[in-house]
Amino acid sequence: MLRLYLLAGAGGLLAVGLLLFGLSHSNYVGNVGIAPAQPVPFSHKHHSGELGIDCRNCHQQVEALATAGLPPTHTCMTCHSEIWAGSPMLAPVRDSLANNEPLHWTRVNRLPDYAYFNHSIHVTKGVGCSSCHGAMNEEQLTYAAQSFKMEFCLSCHRAPENFVRPQNEIWNMQWKPPADQATVGAALVKDYHIAGPERLSDCSICHR
């Protein structure tokens, strides 16, 4: 009986460990695929996909600063003072402009406070939006496409040649690595002056 209890206890501990490991690596932890409530149900699919509005029209800081930034209300009203100007759904946008108070969007993608990330360095070094955010032009409501666990970032930092793309493809949400990505990627790594994996995987790169 003692042996049976010991085996059962060991099996229980193993099962709990596997359960916790699976949970920590599941999409549930990072809220992947779940669109949080927003003050306005903004559709990237409509604006970016159907209307073809460039990402940089709204995220104007993405090529220069650490944060991609959110558009000020007057950017939205550039169009919506003429289009759907009286829509009840857009009342928060009109109120924001009238009261000179920014809309308080719910953050979708979040890294831990101990992890440093800079949008501009990634964009200028050939990392496209969809590599981290997925095909935004297909998202009716905005949700996280990745949980941004450390292994996700390291998969690129250890082999950037597998992920970097030409600058004219950065904003292409449907971009896929070509058949000769190994050759093209290696050349781009050299052109972009990207450091080697031993440097990119150093703790100080992301933890400062």
Image (cartoon, rainbow, N blue to C red):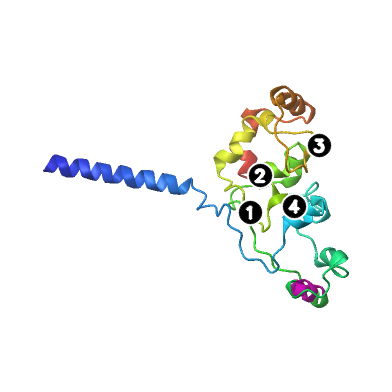
In primary-sequence order, the first of circles 4 and 1 is 4
In primary-sequence order, the first of circles 2 and 4 is 4
**Quadrant that contains the C terminus:** top right
**Whole-percent x and y of residue 74?**
84, 67
Q: Residue at x 74, y 28 (%)?
A: 189
- Identify the secondary structure beneath mark 4: loop
| Residue bearing mark 3 | 167
Question: What's drawn in magenta, residue-wise?
Answer: 90-97
Closer to the camera in the image, 152 or 194: 152
| Residue bearing mark 2 | 132
In primary-sequence order, the first of circles 3 and 2 is 2
**Is the residue under label 1 in contact with that under label 2 (CB below 8 Å)?**
yes
**Is the residue under label 1 in contact with that under label 4 (CB below 8 Å)?**
no
Closer to the camera in the image, 149 or 89: 89
Q: Quadrant of residue 93?
A: bottom right
> Which amino acid does the dot numbered 4 rest on?
Ala
- Identify the secondary structure beneath mark 1: loop
